[in-house]
Amino acid sequence: MTGRARFFPRLALFGPLWAGLCASALAQLAPSPAPTYQNLLTPVLTATETILGQPIAYPAGTPLISSAIVTIPPGGETGWHEHSIPLYAYILEGELTVDYGAEGTRVYRAGEGVMEAIDWPHNGTSTGTIPVRILAVYIGAESIPTAEAVPAPAR
């Protein structure tokens, strides 16, 4: 068998493998599809109710959307308060434990979103080892406060 005769059977074996490797390499060089709005999103929360199961109701009046970064040191508290408007909160850092009185407590950690209770007394405590930082987005109306202090519920 000549050298050429020995070469062609090997080529027949490695030809498909070589073609596959080339196709794979070319596919990796091809440009990625352009990003779309949908594939840029990382969903956090979709809600029709608050954390306590209350339906979300927009307040009457001239709409006013406002936001704030709330920072609470470890062991610090918000104090007992309630919101008469919808409030979306996103935990940027740390850990927050919220006492809802008769409705129990909930723990929120960095990366979590929550639709806060409406017209329900609650108190948030920073229970982590670092300050909790919260992005609060209030979905209100002019002349309606974002929160009001209330007495602690009887136990």
Image (cartoon, rainbow, N blue to C red):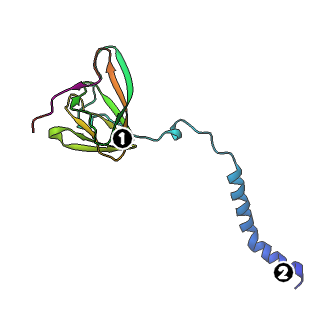
Question: What is the magenta range?
Answer: 146-152
- Which residue is found at the position 46% from the left and 41% from the top? 42
Query: For this view, does 33 lie left or right of residue 72?
Result: right
Determine which quarter of the picture holds residue 63. Answer: top left
In screen coordinates, is 94 left or right of 36?
A: left
Q: Write down the residue under mark 1.
A: 131
Q: What separation in Å lies between label 1 and label 2 (alpha carbons)?
A: 73 Å
Give amino acid for label 1.
Pro
The answer to which of 29 and 83 lies nearer the viewer is 83
At horizontal 38% and vertical 23% (from top left) the residue drawn is 66
At a point 78% along the width and 76% down the height, the residue shown is 10
Which residue position holds label 2?
6
Q: Magenta includes 53?
A: no
Q: Is residue 150 magenta?
A: yes
Give the x, y percent position of residue 70.
35, 32
| Residue 86, image quadrant | top left
Q: Residues within 10 Å of mark 2 (few under 14, many from 20)?
A: few
Q: Position of residue 44 (x, y in %)?
A: 40, 40
**Element under label 2?**
helix
Camera-nearest residue between 16 and 66: 66
Nearest to the observer: residue 50 or residue 80: 80
Q: Amino acid at mark 2?
A: Arg
* Number of numbered discs overlaid on the protein picture: 2
Tell me the chief SS of the magenta region.
Answer: loop
Q: Indicate the position of residue 57 as horizontal and vertical percent values.
A: 27, 25
